[in-house]
Amino acid sequence: MKLTVTTFVSMDGVLQSPGGAEEDPSSDFDLGGWLVPYVDEGFNEIASGWAADADAFLFGRRTYDILASHWPQVTDPDDPMATKLNTLPKHVVTSRPDGLDWVNSHAVTGDLADAVRALKARDGRTLQVHGSGRLIQGLLRHELVDELRLLTFPVVLGKGHRLFEAGAVPSAWRLADARPTPAGVIAQTYAYAGTPAAGTVAVAEDGSEALLTP
């Protein structure tokens, strides 16, 4: 399976507590709920479309607990996101495997890279990560993410946990798709492209600017 990461970020890369103040107030973060004013039909259409090819989910424990407190109560059979989340396998990276009561939930323990590689080796289309900022850091560090699906919101927060923290592993990404919502959210899909390339800005013999790449 291809591993995809879907996450909400501010313009300055913050992903902490997008849906409400109670989600993650760690480090005195008091700006939770910053995505709510921008949720519209376009946002829901994109999010549901991205979830359509899911065959399993992978969550960190904090995100799992947040989702498990909400989505089991959404029983509308016409809600595609609820249907996916409430039925498909949910693999949870956790050091405390108790309390995984949401239907079809499974604990992921031991070495993260080995466990995720084993999940990716299973048949299926996509293994999807939603939220789970700390887990995303580990997956990026081990180069396990095949695709980033970002929803960038038109807000600058100035503080909070970021998608790419200091010390992130250098990587290159190819833009596969980008589209806006009516509220100004930009949906971007990036495919992993390996390590970053580099080049040099130089002046050619005719005096024009030249970009030199390996």
Image: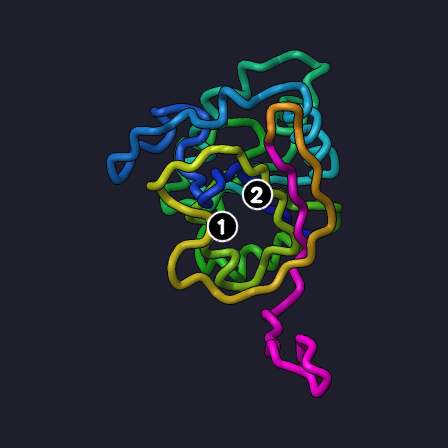
Q: Residues within 10 Å of mark 2 (few under 14, many from 20)?
A: many
Which disc, if any, is residue 129?
A: 2
Inspect the image, locate mark 2, and give the three-letter code of the amino acid beneath it: Val
Query: Considering the image in quadrants, where does the C terminus appear?
Result: bottom right
| Magenta stretch bounds | 185-214
Q: Position of residue 206 (x, y in %)?
A: 73, 84
Q: Is residue 23 left or right of residue 58?
A: left
Q: Earlier in the sequence, mark 1 or mark 2?
A: 2
Question: In percent of the image, x 57 and y 43: which residue is there?
Answer: 129
Residue matched to label 1: 136
Question: In percent of the image, x 48 and y 62: which residue is there?
Answer: 141
Q: Position of residue 132 (x, y in %)?
A: 47, 42
Q: Is residue 136 left or right of residue 31?
A: right
Above/below status of 20 relative to 193: above
Question: In percent of the image, x 63 and y 68: which residue is there?
Answer: 194
Secondary structure of the residue carrying tag 2 is: strand
Confirm or deny contact between disc 1 and disc 2 (CB under 8 A): yes
- Tell me how far mark 1 sits from mark 2, CA to CA: 8 Å
Q: Quadrant of residue 200?
A: bottom right
Q: Is residue 167 magenta?
A: no
Inspect the image, locate mark 1, and give the three-letter code of the amino acid beneath it: Ile
Q: Is residue 201 visible?
A: yes
Above/below status of 8 relative to 37: below
Secondary structure of the residue carrying tag 1 is: helix
Q: Residues within 10 Å of mark 1 (few under 14, many from 20)?
A: many
Return the residue found at the far bottom: 205
Question: In percent of the image, x 46 and y 33: which residue is there?
Answer: 155
